[in-house]
Amino acid sequence: VLVDRLRKSASTCLAAALELRRTGNLAGMREQAVNVEAACREVLDRFPRLAEPHYHLGRMHRALLKTTSALDAQERALTIDPSYAPARYERAVLTADKIRELRRSSMAWMRAEHTEVIRLGPTCEETPGGLRQQLLADLAAAKGLGEAESEVVRGLQAWAARDFAQARVHL
């Protein structure tokens, strides 16, 4: 019953937050986030080893455009349950955003410096190749999602494979 209330509250608040974001009402978005955080804390107090509340927190952070917090929450969910498909999906979306941002930053740096981008060492977690592998693994594990999310998964898989025409079909 408590988890069902969390799901309903998170869904309602997330939808409201996204609508408020479209209208530019950031204060209203933060209020919705407070509601989700309270519902998640309530569940985590009773069920600390449940991945789902972390997923919902991360989803709300992504809606607030707090990418680092969103990714941290999904990582906590996946530490508890590495096969939790919704968190794998969210991490894949966040990873794709991170790859795009790294590429944009690299291209801007290249244009500014008129030189090649310095290659990052193979142990660096931020290397686009390492992120790409994580993205592909998360996409492969993101099963049992809704049709819209499945369509995004197909699009991101095509994008990661550099099949941009197919990616456009799905995204």
Image (cartoon, rainbow, N blue to C red):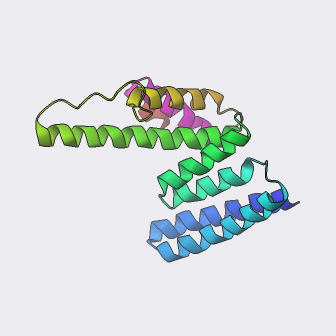
Residue at 45%, 28% (x, y): give it: 130
The answer to which quarter of the image holds residue 17 is bottom right
Between residues 116 and 166, which one lies in front from this camera angle? Answer: 116
Residue at 65%, 46% (x, y): give it: 76
Q: Is residue 27 left or right of residue 11?
A: left
Residue 149, percent from left and from top:
60, 41
Residue 80, percent from left and from top:
73, 42
Residue at 71%, 68% (x, y): give it: 38
Between residues 27 and 46, which one lies in front from this camera angle? Answer: 46
Tell me if residue 76 is in the magenta stretch.
no
Q: Is residue 64 left or right of residue 122?
A: right
The answer to which quarter of the image holds residue 123 is top left
- Res. 114 visible in picture: yes
Label tally:
0
Bounds of the magenta span? Answer: 146-166
Residue 21, percent from left and from top:
48, 66
Tell me if residue 157 is in the magenta stretch.
yes
- Res. 145 visible in picture: no
Q: Is residue 21 left or right of residue 149?
A: left
The residue furthest right is: 1
Residue 169, percent from left and from top:
46, 33
The secondary structure that dominates the magenta segment is: helix
Q: Quadrant of the N terminus?
A: bottom right
Between residues 138 and 22, which one lies in front from this camera angle? Answer: 138
Residue at 50%, 25% (x, y): give it: 133
The residue furthest left is: 114
Between residues 82 and 136, which one lies in front from this camera angle? Answer: 82
Residue 108 higher or lower than 13, as above or below:
above
